[in-house]
Amino acid sequence: DTEVTQTPKHLVMGMTNKKSLKCEQHMGHRAMYWYKQKAKKPPELMFVYSYEKLSINESVPSRFSPECPNSSLLNLHLHALQPEDSALYLCASSQDLGGYNEQFFGPGTRLTVL
Amino acid sequence: AQTVTQSQPEMSVQEAETVTLSCTYDTSESDYYLFWYKQPPSRQMILVIRQEAYKQQNATENRFSVNFQKAAKSFSLKISDSQLGDAAMYFCAYRLINYGGSQGNLIFGKGTKLSVKP
């Protein structure tokens, strides 16, 4: 199983809503990532978890709150988002933080903030 | 800071022909990895090919091969016998070797959109 799954596929939310994005992998990977991708742009790293601990936070606003409940799951909690936060949110995983390791990407959650 | 540059926003190739996508990067490091990722429309990003900087031999994966020129900091992707399914956005990416710290970042170029004409 070389699959990273993400739910939901699409999400529309208002600026006052609270919602969560979910990511799951069963490849035994110990590093998981959240990326934000705007249209026709490359992915931008948001957070990195390594062995369920937050390793990197790329100065992301606090309205995005990541959580790694176990080695297979990664959540991204959303609160009080802005319209400019509308984007494709990609989750990825890799065996560990070793540079050679392939990152496996999920299909993404397309988020629209009204 | 490391940067990755893809100078061709869009490319087009005839089916069964060969196309080369360009990528250059800037780094002061000597040990790193380079990747080409493919993102088809509305589909998942997948790894096409990767190259270790300490290896002189160019990586190949079936119809995909790279021309890695370390001194020139160039890492181009050649796609032979292009197929309709090759149509996608291609991202060149750079990543440092991780020595147990927190340097896990993939640094992406802006991408090249490849169209394949039947």
Image: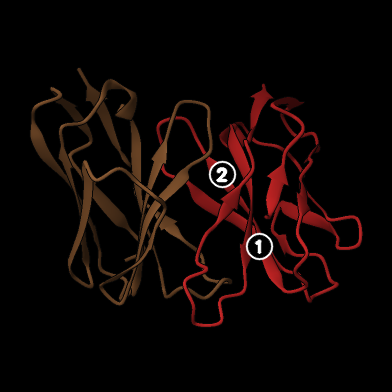
Chain A: give its colour: brown
The residue furthest bottom is B100
Name which quarter of the figure residue B69 lies in: bottom right
Q: Circle 1 sits on which residue?
A: B50
CA neighbours of label 1 inside 10 A, class few (<14), some (14 to 19), many (20+): many
Q: Earlier in the sequence, mark 1 or mark 2?
A: 2
Horizontally, residue A43 falls left or right of residue A63, namely right
What is the quadrant of the N terminus of chain B in the image? bottom right
Q: Circle 2 sits on which residue?
A: B38
Q: Amino acid at mark 1?
A: Arg
Q: Amino acid at mark 2?
A: Lys
The residue furthest top is A114
Q: Residue at x 73, y 24 (%)?
A: B12
- Give the x, y percent position of residue B34: 68, 60
- Give the x, y percent position of residue B45: 47, 46
Q: Residue at x 49, y 78 (%)?
A: B101
User: Where B12 falls versus B72 (above or below)?
Assistant: above
